[in-house]
């Protein structure tokens, strides 16, 4: 097994401030960036804080920015970098730093609680739900989300404009709204909940300008923009501005 010495710059600090610290560390064949961070903890920086859990790309815990790009530390192989390249590891920029590479992602859990859950259809009990396979396949893609929040971090609406966080749920949770809105058994409208209107008025769908940056960083390969956000925008616009839809809604309400 061959090895070499790599140059790393790792952000160290806390809510009060910090900066990049230089390290030279051994790298072995087949290792990922998280392996190197663990080696730094073991040999040079025992107090370096990093969040991780599964080391298999399924828990979403080890999100960080590597050379400025949001990535999972455990899924970024050292082989993708040149051996003489200096690798910079910094915390997610869109969220407040707690310490070193650990950020406070509580914003995302607050947004998750604002999305109303699936509404079961009346008169259909547990185990009695029936759906067409194509409807199952359509929403199954979105359920691959591992809550790494890389899409939230890279979305410039959140990343570059702190003032937008109050009104904007971000791509991960707009995707959740889209999933529920396209679910054939969701009885939200029957219960008085208009998910399309809520997406626009409460979750900030209009802030999204479909740059596809969220799709580009998704480690699960979910086509967030093409399959969730754009169709949701189209349905929301139809509901709000299409005169035939408006007339049909008025007639149904009058009936």
Image (cartoon, rainbow, N blue to C red):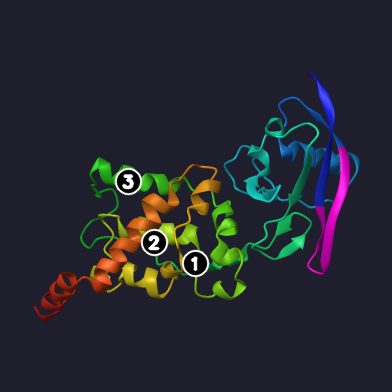
Q: Residue at x 34, y 60 (%)?
A: 232
Q: Tell me the SS state at disc 3.
A: helix
**First of labels 2, 1 by sequence position:** 1
Report the quarter where the C terminus lies: bottom left
Provide the residue designation for mark 2.
177
Q: Tell me the SS state at disc 1.
A: loop
Q: Position of residue 41 (x, y in %)?
A: 84, 44
Observer-nearest of 164 and 38: 164
From the viewer's perspective, tell me whether residue 106 is left or right of residue 34: left
Mark 2 is surrounded, within 10 Å at the Cα level, by few (under 14), some (14 to 19) or many (20 or more) other residues, namely many
Observer-nearest of 43 and 157: 157
Asked whether the viewer can see residue 51, the reply is: yes
| Res. 175 image quadrant | bottom left
**First of labels 1, 3 by sequence position:** 3
Q: Is residue 22 magenta?
A: yes
| Res. 17 image quadrant | bottom right
Provide the residue designation for mark 1.
169
Q: Position of residue 49 (x, y in %)?
A: 79, 52
- The main secondary structure of the magenta stretch is strand
Q: Tell me the SS state at disc 2.
A: helix
CB-based contact (under 8 Å), mark 2 and mark 1: yes
C-alpha separation, residue under disc 2 versus residue under disc 1: 10 Å
The disc placed on residue 122 is none
Mark 3 is surrounded, within 10 Å at the Cα level, by few (under 14), some (14 to 19) or many (20 or more) other residues, namely some
Provide the residue designation for mark 3.
138
C-alpha separation, residue under disc 1 versus residue under disc 3: 22 Å
Q: What residue span does the magenta drawing correspond to?
A: 11-24
From the viewer's perspective, tell me whether residue 159 is left or right of residue 194: right
**Which residue is the extreme one toward the left?**
255
C-alpha separation, residue under disc 2 versus residue under disc 3: 14 Å
Q: Position of residue 126 (x, y in %)?
A: 29, 52
Total marks shown come to 3
């Amino acid at each position: 097994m061959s090895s070499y010495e790599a140059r790393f710059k790792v952000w160290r600090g806390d809510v009060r401030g910090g900066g990049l610290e230089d390290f030279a560390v051994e790298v072995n064949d087949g290792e990922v960036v998280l392996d190197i961070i663990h080696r730094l903890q073991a040999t040079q920086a025992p107090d370096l804080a990093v969040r991780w859990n599964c080391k298999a790309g399924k828990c979403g815990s080890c999100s960080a920015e590597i050379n400025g790009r949001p990535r999972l530390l455990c899924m970024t192989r050292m082989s993708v970098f040149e051996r003489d390249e200096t690798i910079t590891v910094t915390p997610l920029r869109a969220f407040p730093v707690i310490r070193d590479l650990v950020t406070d992602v509580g914003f995302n859990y607050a947004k998750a609680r604002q999305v109303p859950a699936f509404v079961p259809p009346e008169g259909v009990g547990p185990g009695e739900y029936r759906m067409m396979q194509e409807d199952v396949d359509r929403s199954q893609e979105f359920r691959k989300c591992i809550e790494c929040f890389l899409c939230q971090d890279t979305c410039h609406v959140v990343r570059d404009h702190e003032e937008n966080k109050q009104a904007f749920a971000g791509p991960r949770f707009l995707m959740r709204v889209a999933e529920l809105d396209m679910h054939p058994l969701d009885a939200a409208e029957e219960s008085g909940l208009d998910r399309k209107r809520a997406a626009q008025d409460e979750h900030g769908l209009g802030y999204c300008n479909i740059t596809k940056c969220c799709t580009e960083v998704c480690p699960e390969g979910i086509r967030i923009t093409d399959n969730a956000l754009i169709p949701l925008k189209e349905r929301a616009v139809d509901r709000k501005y299409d005169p035939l839809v408006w007339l049909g809604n008025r007639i149904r309400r009058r009936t």
